[in-house]
């Protein structure tokens, strides 16, 4: 065999090895493309399931929102009662502080008079009792006074709660949600 024949034989073997290598690579590529095809075929089923679950989630959220609104509506009077009770308690406690302060100043005055004039403790005690009884009767006659700012704030909160209830009812009935509330 001549050198030309040997060169042609080597080129033939090289092409054969190249063809085998390319066949293996193309076979693996075909396997990958088959996997992609199967994935793409199952994609619509998965999307339909996902959309169904999303619809169920939105429906459940709407029901939960409506239930929360009903419960909030039931609790609103309780909050108003607690607020009124707080106002009344604050008014009476401030009256009690006034009585205690005035009694304290009276006691100090009585002690000072006792030292200066050596008057017996019965007169001071009687004056203190009379003053306390008089202050209590005056406190019972007075109506509790609400500060304007607290009242205005309470009214604003009540208005805001009513507005939120209306918006929630409208959103629940129409199925629309406000994007800025997220």
Image: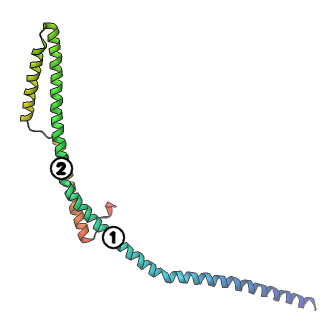
Front-most of 130 and 66?
Answer: 130
Above or below for 19 versus 57: below
To which residue does mark 2 refer? Answer: 80
Above or below — where is 172 with respect to 147? below
Q: Do the residues labelled 1 and 2 touch (CB within 8 Å)?
A: no
Rendered image quadrant of residue 34: bottom right
Q: Residue at x 11, y 21 (%)?
A: 128
Quadrant the N terminus occupies:
bottom right
Q: In the rendered image, which residue does mark 1 sit on?
A: 58
In the image, residue 177 above or below residue 79? below
Mark 1 lies on a secondary structure that is helix
Which of label 1 and label 2 is nearer to you?
Answer: 2
Q: Distance between the residues labelled 1 and 2?
A: 33 Å
Q: x%, y% of residue 140?
A: 8, 35
Q: In this rendering, would 35 be left or right of 24?
A: left
Above or below 177: residue 49: below
Quarter-wise, where is residue 124 in the image? top left
Q: Circle 2: is it few (<14), some (14-19), or many (20+) Cα within 10 Å?
A: few
Left or right, 50 with respect to 100, comes to right
Q: Sequence order check: which comes first, mark 1 or mark 2? A: 1
Q: Residues within 10 Å of mark 1 (few under 14, many from 20)?
A: few
161, 11: nearer the viewer:
161
- Work out which quarter of the rendered image holds the C terminus and state it: bottom left
Residue 120 vs residue 42, the one in the foreground: 120
Residue shown at the point (16%, 28%) measured from the top left: 98
Q: Which residue is depicted at the point 12% across and 11% down?
A: 120
- Residue under the image location 93 percent in, 91 percent down: 2
Locate residue 117, reporting x and y percent: 12, 7
Residue 53 visible here: yes
135 sits to left or right of 31: left
């Amino acid at each position: 065999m001549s050198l030309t024949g040997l060169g042609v034989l080597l080129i033939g073997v090289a092409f054969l090895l190249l063809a085998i290598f390319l066949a293996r690579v193309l076979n693996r590529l075909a396997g990958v493309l088959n996997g992609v095809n199967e994935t793409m075929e199952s994609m619509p089923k998965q999307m339909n399931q996902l959309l169904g679950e999303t619809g169920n989630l939105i429906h459940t959220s709407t029901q939960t929102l409506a239930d929360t609104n009903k419960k909030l509506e039931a609790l609103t009077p309780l909050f108003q009662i607690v607020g009124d009770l707080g106002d009344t308690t604050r008014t009476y406690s401030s009256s009690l502080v006034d009585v205690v302060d005035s009694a304290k100043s009276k006691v100090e005055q009585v002690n000072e008079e006792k030292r200066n004039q050596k008057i017996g403790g019965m007169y001071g005690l009687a004056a203190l009792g009379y003053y306390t009884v008089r202050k209590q009767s005056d406190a019972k006659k007075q109506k509790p006074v609400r500060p304007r700012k607290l009242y205005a704030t309470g009214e604003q909160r009540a208005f805001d709660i009513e507005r939120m209830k209306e918006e929630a009812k409208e959103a629940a009935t129409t199925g629309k949600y406000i994007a800025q509330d997220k």
